[in-house]
Image (cartoon, helix red, strand yellow):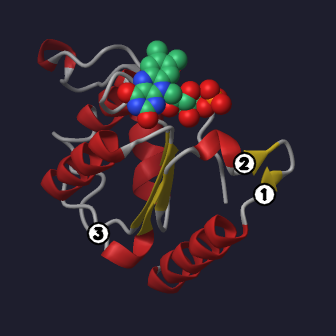
Amino acid sequence: MIPYPSVADLPHFDPDIDVLPAPTSVAHFREQVRSADGILICTPEYAMGVPGSLKNALDWTVSTADFRLKPVMLVTASLSGEKAHVSLLGTLRVIEAVVPEGNTALVRFARTKVGADGITDGPTLSAIQGVLENFLAAL
Ligand SMILES: Cc1cc2nc3c(=O)[nH]c(=O)nc-3n(C[C@H](O)[C@H](O)[C@H](O)COP(=O)(O)O)c2cc1C
């Protein structure tokens, strides 16, 4: 599994610069997505929505369809997280990613369930292990 270094390197999405050649960081990001067998997204919720940096990264893949038919595992781990989770599922549907329900998890009150060494809450750990197994089986 290769963690993507930083979606913060991407410029803000602007259709006027969504032309070829793409900005270097955008071209690199798209290539990483395209060459991956699957994508694991784990995100918090900010201000009742998807963190802007993550949405921005996904927006850069719309015109090139890099997520098309790509298996995705989505974990939203936050205080509440539901709005971001639902919103992201909508975005992933639009960009034609493959996100079966068994590949997703919403972890509420994440701070009470995750410590420095990983997931500390038994049911959450089992749920994430199950989702991860489904995801790996889909690859
Ligand atoms: C500016 C800001 C806005 C936030 N808004 C939400 C929110 O709308 N819903 C939510 O579930 N959590 C919200 N949170 C809490 C984050 O989801 C939480 O900080 C996240 O789980 C990251 O965990 P950490 O702060 O322990 O790193 C917010 C946090 C910040 C800093």
Observer-nearest of 58 and 44: 44
Label 1 crowd (10 A; few <14 / some 14-19 / many >=20): some
Q: Is residue 122 visible?
A: yes
Amino acid type at mark 2: Val
Q: Which residue sits at x=35%, y=22%?
A: 52
**Sequence-wise, which precedes: disc 2 or disc 1?**
2
Query: Up-down: is 26 above or below 2?
Result: above
Which residue in the rendered view is the most extreme toward the right?
117
Q: Which residue sits at x=29%, y=69%?
A: 98
Q: Disc 2, ligand 1: is the CB inside 8 Å? A: yes
Q: Disc 1, ligand 1: is the CB inside 8 Å? A: no
Where residue 139 appears, x then y in whole percent?
Answer: 48, 79
Residue hosting label 2: 114
Could you tell whether 62 is left or right of 133 in the image?
left
Q: Nearer the viewer, mark 3 or mark 2?
A: 2
Instruction: Kindly state the secondary structure of the residue where label 2 is placed.
Output: strand
**Sequence-wise, which precedes: disc 3 or disc 1?**
3
Q: Which residue sits at x=33%, y=46%?
A: 82
Report the number of discs.
3
Instruction: Kindly state the secondary structure of the residue where label 1 is placed.
Output: loop
Residue hosting label 1: 120
Could you tell whether 47 is left or right of 134 in the image?
left
Is mark 2 in CB contact (under 8 Å) with mark 1? yes
Observer-nearest of 122 and 28: 122
Amino acid type at mark 1: Thr
Is mark 3 in CB contact (under 8 Å) with mark 1? no
Q: Which residue sits at x=49%, y=75%?
A: 135
Where residue 80 appears, x then y in whole percent?
Answer: 42, 41
Q: Where is the N terminus found, in terms of image quarters?
A: bottom right
Mark number, residue 98 = 3
Where residue 105 appears, x then y in whole percent?
Answer: 45, 63
